């Protein structure tokens, strides 16, 4: 295990942010994430916000696990340039979540973790994400682990 991240989100506050006129909160998610959250809300007969809040907690947890893998409190991105929509939290057919990093994000992860954790003599590590998302009451939570094989 290279790093672990955990985050919690207040669903009500998150929903209020989503509904603010002119809010860019939905832009933090990919079209696939928005579609899956909408379909899950229809299936569960609840609001889309609870499913997006869980995904948001997972995205935050990805960055935290990545930082831990680098051994620093410094994020691989700044607050202003984190490509949130390219850090996707998608559901498999069975409903289990998975992390999918878009183009540049995947490349940046491999380069940063490879340079920091592994020597040049070692082959590039095979990196895997493990993610668990839950919600109860008004709280959504996620735990993410970054592992190398």
Image (cartoon, rainbow, N blue to C red):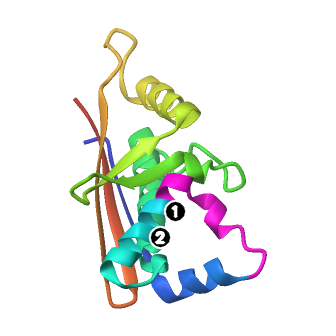
User: Disc number at residue 24?
Assistant: none
Q: Residue at x 45, y 39 (%)?
A: 70
Residue 100, image x, y percentages: 42, 43
Residue 30: within the magenta?
yes
Q: Position of residue 32 (x, y in %)?
A: 49, 53
Residue nearest the observer in this picture, 6 or 34? 34
- Quarter of the image with the N terminus in it: top left
The residue depicted at 71 percent of the width and 82 percent of the height is 20
Q: Secondary structure at mark 2?
A: helix
Decide which of 124, 47 is in the foreground and name it: 47
Say if mark 2 contacts mark 1, CB within 8 Å.
yes
Residue closest to the far top = 121
Give me the disc on residue 34.
Answer: 1
Picture layout, residue 118 above or below residue 71? above
Residue 60 visible? The answer is no
Q: Is residue 147 left or right of residue 124?
A: left
Specify start and end residues of the magenta stretch as a single range. 21-34
């Amino acid at each position: 295990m290279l790093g672990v991240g955990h985050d919690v989100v207040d669903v009500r506050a998150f929903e209020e942010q989503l509904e603010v006129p002119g809010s860019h909160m939905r832009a933090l998610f990919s079209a696939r994430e928005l579609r899956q959250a909408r379909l899950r809300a229809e299936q569960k007969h609840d609001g889309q916000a609870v499913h997006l809040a869980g995904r948001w907690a997972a995205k935050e947890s990805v960055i935290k696990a990545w930082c831990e893998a680098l051994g620093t409190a410094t994020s691989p991105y700044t607050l202003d340039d984190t490509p949130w929509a390219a850090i996707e939290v998608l559901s498999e057919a069975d409903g289990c979540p998975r992390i999918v990093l878009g183009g540049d994000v995947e490349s940046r992860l491999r380069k940063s973790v490879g340079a920091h954790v592994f020597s040049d003599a070692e082959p590039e590590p095979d990196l895997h994400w493990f993610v668990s998302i839950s919600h109860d009451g008004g709280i959504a939570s996620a735990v993410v682990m970054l592992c190398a094989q």
